[in-house]
Image (cartoon, helix red, strand yellow):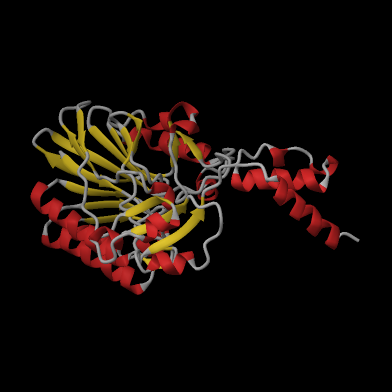
């Protein structure tokens, strides 16, 4: 049994006022081409198909067209769950009818986890589709239990479904959330695109040990929770500057006999990359206008010590899709960490100067500062 595991498409995403719909359309075309070449037994999407609960009409049209071609025309089953960005109710609309076409969209949490069984020459493979869990929803199904956390909710749902999970067959869980093995949240690498407040949504990955493979969504950087059985496939595209250095990929999973799992990581071409460029304003502004990579999404980190008037507008003539810029700061921050109440204005100015520029003000600069201070002091 071979399937493609992916997640976090975020169709309809806008990044720094740039719509990514054209980039996402290109990526879905590349994914479609890969499915034609590889002919997997299923396509798995572990949540966050859309970027927001009420997606724009063109995002709905893009996703609908893609799913129609894959499940309808190519006859490749699509197994997907809702993520925290999706509207569970909207995603689940018409799901019972769509299943006849091989499109399984599990949007709404159910106490009894939905199961889709596919067959290969070795027998059945059971896919359990568990949408993003909100503890409040689970409490209604287990009124006698004290559910205080996401971990409590997930554990109870899995325990309730244990009798329906045959240990002798190959079983795959498709779900969306913040999972960490042995409760070590530092082992999972997040980006600015994911939100986690104090680890309150952390779920112990040991609850998934009974599955042959767990196809996870929510974390945007591709990574293992437990190799080779629990994996975040990562987002379809780079959705924040903090992801610029990430290599995005899909996860192609092959289940052989019970307990035998192998994976590979196909990479899809992108229409425009997201890159961070570092250097002085002069260096960056002398790029090559019209060059192919100049169309990439660019975030500039300027090494200049002083502000450059009109820097964004001037850089946009070279990089039309520039997202933003920042000035490098070489100060250590040590001076400002001390109590300012006991320091003189001269000391505070020196600390601030070192923090911003990474050097000590000259005697002439101090003299000018004291002259201004004298003028403005009552």
**Residue 38: where, in percent of width, then height?**
11, 47
Q: Is residue 164 left or right of residue 72?
A: right
Observer-nearest residue: 287 or 88? 287
**Residue 13: where, in percent of width, then height?**
38, 62
Observer-nearest residue: 305 or 42? 305
In the rendered image, which quarter is residue 344 located in?
Answer: top right
Residue 158 can be seen in this image = yes
Residue drawn at 56 percent across, 46 percent down: 329
Query: Where the N terminus falls, by quadrant?
Result: top left
Residue 123, relative to residue 322: is it above or below? Answer: above
Residue 20, relative to residue 145: is it above or below? Answer: below
Q: How many marks?
A: 0
Residue drawn at 85 percent across, 57 percent down: 374
Residue 247, relative to residue 301: is it above or below? Answer: above
Q: Residue furthest bottom?
A: 57
Observer-nearest residue: 171 or 338? 338
Q: Residue furthest right?
A: 378
Residue drawn at 18 percent across, 48 percent down: 42
**Residue 326: where, in percent of width, then height?**
50, 55
Q: Is residue 220 left or right of residue 77?
A: right
């Amino acid at each position: 049994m071979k399937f493609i595991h992916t997640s976090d498409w975020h169709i309809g995403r806008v990044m720094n006022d740039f719509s990514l719909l054209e980039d996402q359309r290109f990526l879905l075309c590349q994914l479609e081409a890969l499915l034609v070449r590889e002919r997997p037994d299923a396509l798995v999407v572990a949540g966050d198909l859309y970027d927001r609960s009420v997606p724009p009409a063109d995002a709905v049209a893009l996703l609908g067209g893609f799913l129609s071609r894959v499940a309808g025309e190519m006859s490749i089953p699509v197994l997907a769950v809702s993520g925290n960005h999706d509207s569970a109710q909207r995603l689940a609309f018409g799901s019972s009818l769509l299943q006849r076409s091989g499109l399984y969209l599990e949007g709404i949490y159910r106490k009894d986890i939905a199961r889709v069984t596919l067959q290969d020459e070795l027998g059945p493979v059971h896919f359990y589709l568990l949408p993003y869990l909100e503890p409040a929803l689970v409490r209604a199904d287990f009124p006698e239990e004290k559910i205080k956390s996401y971990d409590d909710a997930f554990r109870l749902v899995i325990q309730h479904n244990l009798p329906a999970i045959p240990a002798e067959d190959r079983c795959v869980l498709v779900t969306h959330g913040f999972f960490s093995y042995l409760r070590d949240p530092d082992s999972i690498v997040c980006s600015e695109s994911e939100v986690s407040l104090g680890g309150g949504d952390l779920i112990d990955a040991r609850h998934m040990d009974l599955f042959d493979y767990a196809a996870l969504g929510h974390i945007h950087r591709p990574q293992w929770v437990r190799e080779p059985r629990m994996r975040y496939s990562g987002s379809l595209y780079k959705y924040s500057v903090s992801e610029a250095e990430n290599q995005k990929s899909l996860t192609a999973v092959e289940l052989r006999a019970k307990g035998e799992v192998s994976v590979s990581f196909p990479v899809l071409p992108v229409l425009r990359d997201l890159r961070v460029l570092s250097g002085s304003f002069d260096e960056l502004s002398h790029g090559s206008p019209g060059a192919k990579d100049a169309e990439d999404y660019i975030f500039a980190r300027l090494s200049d010590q002083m502000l450059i008037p009109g820097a964004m507008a001037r850089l946009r003539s070279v990089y039309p899709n520039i997202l933003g810029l920042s000035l490098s700061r070489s100060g250590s921050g040590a001076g400002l960490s001390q109590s300012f109440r006991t320091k003189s204005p001269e000391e505070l100015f020196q600390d601030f100067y070192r923090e911003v520029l990474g050097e000590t003000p000259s005697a002439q600069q101090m003299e000018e500062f004291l002259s201004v201070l004298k003028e403005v002091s009552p």
